[in-house]
Image (cartoon, helix red, strand yellow):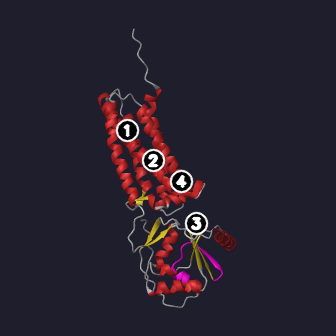
């Protein structure tokens, strides 16, 4: 009798492994997306996550880049696990067709995710790690790149590919499209019009655009705050700090009493910020974040309305403030 060769373990379990990795990717990108949409802070062992995830490179077509990653992982999970729901004994032909078709989709998806993740790793290391060292590392981004790599490897070794030429052709097409799209997108990030007021780091890389215009009341309040010694302490990568400046508008932001506290920010005053924010925590009895205002010897943590700043600073000028809350746009 001819002994039937057993199916290799990796062939039997590759879809489950890809599905499990995709599930981890869903948790990873889902967590980032939820916090981005809720304007909450992503928990991370270093400040690298905030720097990277609040940068213009974390947005695509006005939506969090992580949202697209979440959709990609969801698609990979469906492609990997859907055929397993079909009973191979009752519907053998359907099961076989689904497996063949979804393997090509898995390979194409994993190839695109691998290349795009690789490009994002290039951006992270060239733009952030080169400047901030370990504090420029986004561990969520590293995890996503690892997941994409593992899924790509599993699509290659997870089945017996009879037509390797088909893989090379498909991989080449997907790879070219992905690389061209990635490079074009990366080149467009940070480009703003010449008359735009931007918030940038020390190297001139723009992070946010201030679009509101200033009325007389906004300008006079900014001048009053500066003359009375009021100061806002913030970080260039902080969206709430930009939203605070958005209340004042483009023109008044030039009069704005502001101290940069983030490493890598323009004219950053790290030691001053550490001392002042330490005093703020003692006075308020709680941990303060960005922005933090110091007005007439008192500290106020978080974004303030212009009316609140007028009252706390004793401002008596015109108070017909015209700017309402508006989230800052990233370049």
Label 1 with label 2: CB-CB less than 8 Å: no
Q: Are marks 2 and 3 in contact (CB under 8 Å)?
A: no
Q: Position of residue 15 (x, y in %)?
A: 42, 35
Task: Point out the tag, 4 or 2, that comes first from the N-terminus.
Answer: 2
Of marks 4 and 2, the one in the foreground: 2
In space, the residues marked 1 and 4 are separated at their CA atoms by 26 Å
The tag earlier along the polypeptide, 1 or 2, is 1
Q: In the rendered view, tell whether residue 121 sits above or below residue 291.
A: above
Depth check: give the residue in front, 34 or 198.
Answer: 198
Residue 303 forms part of the magenta stretch: yes
Which residue is pictured at 40% across the width and 38% down the height?
A: 80
Crowd tier of the residue under label 1, counting other residues whose Cα lies within 10 Å: few below 14, some 14–19, many 20 or above = many
**What range of the chain is rendered magenta?**
296-309
Quarter of the image where one finds residue 158: top left
Q: Distance between the residues labelled 1 and 2?
A: 16 Å
Q: Residue tagged by mark 3?
A: 262
Q: Which residue lies furthest to the top in this view?
A: 1
Q: Mark 1 points at which residue?
A: 107
Classify the position of the N terminus by image quarter.
top left
Identify which residue is drawn at 43% across, 85% down: 215
The answer to whether residue 49 is left or right of residue 76 is right
Disc 3 element: loop
Q: Is mark 2 on a helix, strand or loop?
A: helix
| N-term mark: 3 or 4 | 4
Q: Where is residue 31 in the image (x, y as percent from the top left)?
A: 50, 54
Q: Which of marks 3 and 1 is nearer the N terminus?
A: 1
Mark number displayed over residue 187: none
Where residue 138 is drawn, which disc sits there? 4
- Give the alpha-carbon distance from disc 3 to disc 4, as whole Å: 16 Å
Report which residue position mark 2 lands on: 118
């Amino acid at each position: 009798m001819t002994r039937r060769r057993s199916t290799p373990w990796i062939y039997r379990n590759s879809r489950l492994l890809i599905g499990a990795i995709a599930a981890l990717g869903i948790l990873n990108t889902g967590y980032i997306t939820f916090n981005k949409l809720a304007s909450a802070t992503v928990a991370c062992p270093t400040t690298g996550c905030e720097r990277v995830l609040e940068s213009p490179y974390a947005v695509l077509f006005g939506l969090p880049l992580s949202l697209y990653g979440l959709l990609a992982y969801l698609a990979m999970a469906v492609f990997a696990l859907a055929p397993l729901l079909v009973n191979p004994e009752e519907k053998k032909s359907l099961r076989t067709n689904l497996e063949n078709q979804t393997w090509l989709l898995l390979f194409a998806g994993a190839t695109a995710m691998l290349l795009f993740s690789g490009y994002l790793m290039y951006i992270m290391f060239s733009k952030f790690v080169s400047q901030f060292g370990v504090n420029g590392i986004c561990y969520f981004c590293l995890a996503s790149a690892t997941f994409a790599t593992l899924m790509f490897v599993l699509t290659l070794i997870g089945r017996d590919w009879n037509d390797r030429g088909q893989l090379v052709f498909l991989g080449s097409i997907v790879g070219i499209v992905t690389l061209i799209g990635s490079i074009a997108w990366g080149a467009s990030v940070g480009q703003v019009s010449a008359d735009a007021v931007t918030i940038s780091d020390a190297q001139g890389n723009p992070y946010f655009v201030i679009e509101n215009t200033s009325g007389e009341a906004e300008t006079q309040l900014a001048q009053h705050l500066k003359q009375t010694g009021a100061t806002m302490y913030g970080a260039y990568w902080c969206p709430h700090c930009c939203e605070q400046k958005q209340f004042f508008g483009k023109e008044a932001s030039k009069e704005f009493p502001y101290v940069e506290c983030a490493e890598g920010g323009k004219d950053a005053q790290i030691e001053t910020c550490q001392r002042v924010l330490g005093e703020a925590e003692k006075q308020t009895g709680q941990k303060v974040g960005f922005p933090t205002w110091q007005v007439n010897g008192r500290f106020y943590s978080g974004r303030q309305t212009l009316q609140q700043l007028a009252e706390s600073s004793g401002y008596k000028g015109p108070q017909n403030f015209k700017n309402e809350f508006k989230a800052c746009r990233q370049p």
